Amino acid sequence: MLSSVPRTLRTAGTALAAWTPLRRGAAAGGAALTALLIGLPTAVIPNPLFSRMTPTLWWNYPALAATAVLAGIVIATYVKAPADPRASRSGSIGGVLSFLAVGCPVCNKFVLMALGTSGALGIWAPLQPFLALASVALLAVAAVKRLTGELACRTSARDTAPAA
């Protein structure tokens, strides 16, 4: 079964397993912060400051959870690790897409200006699950790039060290 898993994913898993408690804590903190930064203003997490014009849908919760976990992993890779701008762009775009995906379609001012209320409900709302999938995919790509980069950099540094 492991032979069917791509080598890149195994490498990312190896890097993730080697994390220190500091990195794991940073991932948990990053996940919690992401969940709050996306969940509160979109009212997926009920709160007195924000409300929705449309009900929260069932898929908003797993989309927010997956986004938070993957964003937490990406954020934690920046703890004592060099930045890869390509992974950073994927993660940033994934986070923005997640915010647009789980948000109330009628509460988004840009969508309302561009499509109107009926367009927001008839055109934008059906696209939101696909935005959620794209968001999770981009965050997963960013996480895998960052994790495999950790081992690649560590290996290449060992390989290029002068012999004693």
Image: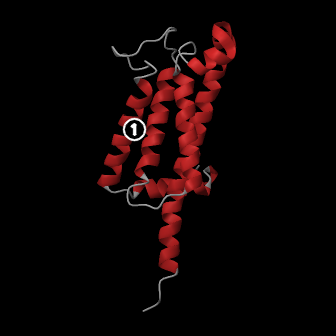
Answer with the quarter of the image where residue 45 lies: top left
User: From what the image shows, is residue 105 above or below residue 4?
Assistant: above
Across and down, in percent, residue 100 comes to 56, 26
Q: Amino acid at mark 1?
A: Ala
State the residue lying farthest toward the bottom. Answer: 164
Which residue has dot 1 on it? Answer: 31
Q: Residue at x 52, y 81 (%)?
A: 160
Q: Residue at x 34, y 16 (%)?
A: 47
State the residue lying farthest toward the front. Answer: 113
User: From what the image shows, is residue 42 above or below residue 13?
Assistant: above
Q: Residue at x 37, y 36 (%)?
A: 33
Specify whether 75 is left or right of 21. right
> 113 or 16, which is in the foreground?
113
Q: Residue at x 67, y 18 (%)?
A: 114
Specify whether 123 is left or right of 144. right
Q: Secondary structure at mark 1?
A: helix
Specify whether 115 is left or right of 84. right
User: From what the image shows, is residue 79 above or below residue 41?
Assistant: below
How many labels were placed on the picture?
Answer: 1
> 25 or 112, which is in the foreground?
112
Q: Is residue 51 visible?
A: yes
Specify whether 87 is left or right of 42. right
Across and down, in percent, residue 11 comes to 53, 58
Across and down, in percent, residue 144 comes to 55, 51
Across and down, in percent, residue 125 comes to 63, 16
Q: Is residue 140 visible?
A: no
Scheme by which the image is coloured: secondary structure
The C terminus: image quadrant? bottom left
